[in-house]
Amino acid sequence: MKKFILEKIEVPKGAANADLIKRLYDLGLHPGLEVEIVSKISFNSVTVIQYGSTRLALNEEEFACLHGR
Amino acid sequence: MSTWALVGSPNSGKTTLYNWLTGSKSKTVNYPGSTVEYNVGKLRAHLAERINDQEITIVDTPGVYSLTPQSEDEQVTHDVLYTQHNVDSLNGVIVVLDATQLSRHLMIAKQIVDSNYQTIFVVTMLDLIEKEGSQIQLEELKNELGPNIVLFDGILGRGLNEIVDLLPVTPANDEIFHHENWDIEKHTQVIQWAENLAAKTIVNRNEQKSAAHFTNQADKVLTHPILGLVIFFSIMTLLFASIYWAATPLMDLIDGLFSSAVAVATENIPGLFGEFVGNGFIAAIGGVVIFVPQIFILFLGIGILESTGYLARVAALIDKPLSMVGLGGRSFVPLLSGFACSIPAIMATRNITSKKERLIAQSIIPFMTCSARLPVYALLIAFLFGDENPLLAGLVMALMYFGAIVVGAIAANIISVFVNDTTKSRLIMELPLYRRPRFGYIFMQSLSKAKSFVVKAGPIIFGLALILWFATNFPRPEVVEGQEPLSAVEIAKDSYASEVGQAVEPIFRPMGVDWRVGFGLISAFAAREVFVSSLALMFNITDEDEDAAQQGLLAAMKKATFENGEPIFTVASVAGIFIFFMIALQCTSTVGILKREMGSWKPALMQLFFSNLVAYCLAVTVVFVLKSFGL
């Protein structure tokens, strides 16, 4: 399972969805947070991530907003 | 009297607290202009005694991730807090905070504090915190949020009295500030504040003992890319089998009871009034009550899956295939249920949070091959293949199921173009900790859904059933004294429905059928399976034994001809009827429930019109093509 430090939360170029970014923050995601990729499900299109006690399922568009190293 | 709203994130234990405070006697209400439901109830009498029997109303608002709404559910909570159209003026807010997710839930707490509401903070999931050996230290939390903080155990009810004692304090604050939309900088500041505060509040955490540890282990199996899908399909098969098979004995029982009641009424009340009471009134009530077992079982199943935390996983597991037709994972259970019956399935779309997805799901559920279509398909397949080719018969039946899915997918794509909502389908789903379901509560909730169906959709279905009874039983020719009473066949042949069937025969002719089949198709609007009995009525089949009646009907169908001697039932015309039944929205009960769930007659009637138009055009095309091949 891969871990990464979240550097920024940003919509990929060309997409426009400010509400999505806000919702990711509402769910406690923020730059500097350690995030673990738990699994890829639903024919590899959904990513399950874990941070603290929170486990989230994100589709491709949503996961693409999380940039980290 | 005072009113308090319960506010918190989804899965925070809000509804558990609501049930402890109000008991089972609560009222489920729809917010004006919305299909979102929430509960309103009075504080239980024995709890009210603690505070001199003061009358206190509790409002259980839908779960939110923020007070800046992004879904219909969140809009309702926002409106309860800030516009209060549908609730009495709020005296205060009880903010529910899950101790295992404290840092995230503190963000909602911060938003409520900033709104200047009088607030009680209730920290839940004590059992999980105690199980993992962690401690809760409230000093820092009280410094930041104020003194009204109560620890609450949802299993044993510990902390309930302390919450009640805080309810009747000072009057509501006069000035309430709307929650400002936070920018990213403010958001980040609040998250860091919440993380620091949570770390000082929940101490000595042991990851190995935590409930999250069990969830992580279970998810390795339940959301495994392959094994997870196998388990998912097994659980869904079990749920589907339950609505299909477990409901059947209960439905048969209800059917038997109402049939007896109809017989008692028609035999004991003389004349037309007796017929109205029996075949009209009592039978129409039976037509509503018959759906109750399926609705109850479906909501019981969904309730169990949801409260264990598995339903969120289902939505994530099946997201990809459904997103291809503009739907999300939450649509899967309602769509699957549609293969048993559209009525409970359309009611189950309430669990879909996106308005667009809900509308698409509601629109395509009637295409799924419900159990009422099966007697029709069985008759038509028996006509085409008899007993000689069971393999081909099975293949055609499978084709009808597959065809329904394809039609549903095409319809979903078409509808999504017309729905005025440009936002992309969103998954972003919290996968909660696995919990043991609270069977008592789920049982009561399922009963409440079934009751809500009877009270709210029942009158519409009842009214439509009465209209159809009238159309198929009137006008009555004069009976001369001494003459035998008219048989059902004679009444039906001169009825308004029959007149309509004959008048619109030119419409049915391109489908390759005559007015008698047309009458069957019109009668099927009462319920699809009525097509078979109507056809039997039109072809004078009077055998009481079911098998003999079917054989008699098949023989009559084989002999039936137009005036010019050409056979009515050919491969082409039977294929046309197949297509019509696959696509047409004939079930008036479904139209009734669509009206109820969509909120107005317009979309329900539009769906009725377009489904039947498309079904008719396709049926005519198929008949034309097959006839040109000599079939």
Image: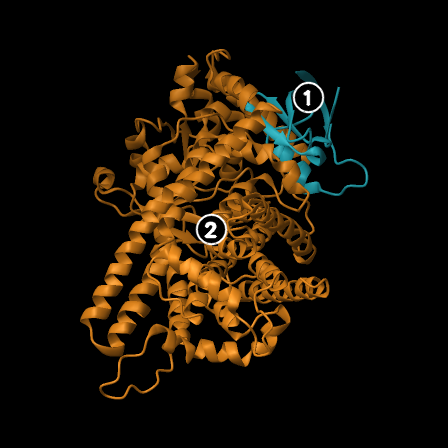
Chain colours: A cyan, B orange
Residue B171 visible in the snapshot: no
In the foreground, B30 or B567: B567
Give the image location of residue B433, x and y in percent: 49, 25
* Residue at x 51% of width, y 22% of height: B198
Pointer 2 chain? B
Name the residue that disc number 1 marks: A32
Foreground tag (1 vs 2):
2
Labels in figure, total:
2
Name the residue that disc number 2 marks: B371
Identify whether B377 is placed above or below B9.
below
Helix, strand or loop at disc 2? Answer: helix
In the image as oriented, which residue stretches furthest toward the right?
A: A13
Image position of A60 (left or right of B170): right
In the foreground, B539 or B299: B539
Q: Quadrant of residue A13?
A: top right
Identify whether B276 is placed above or below B193.
below
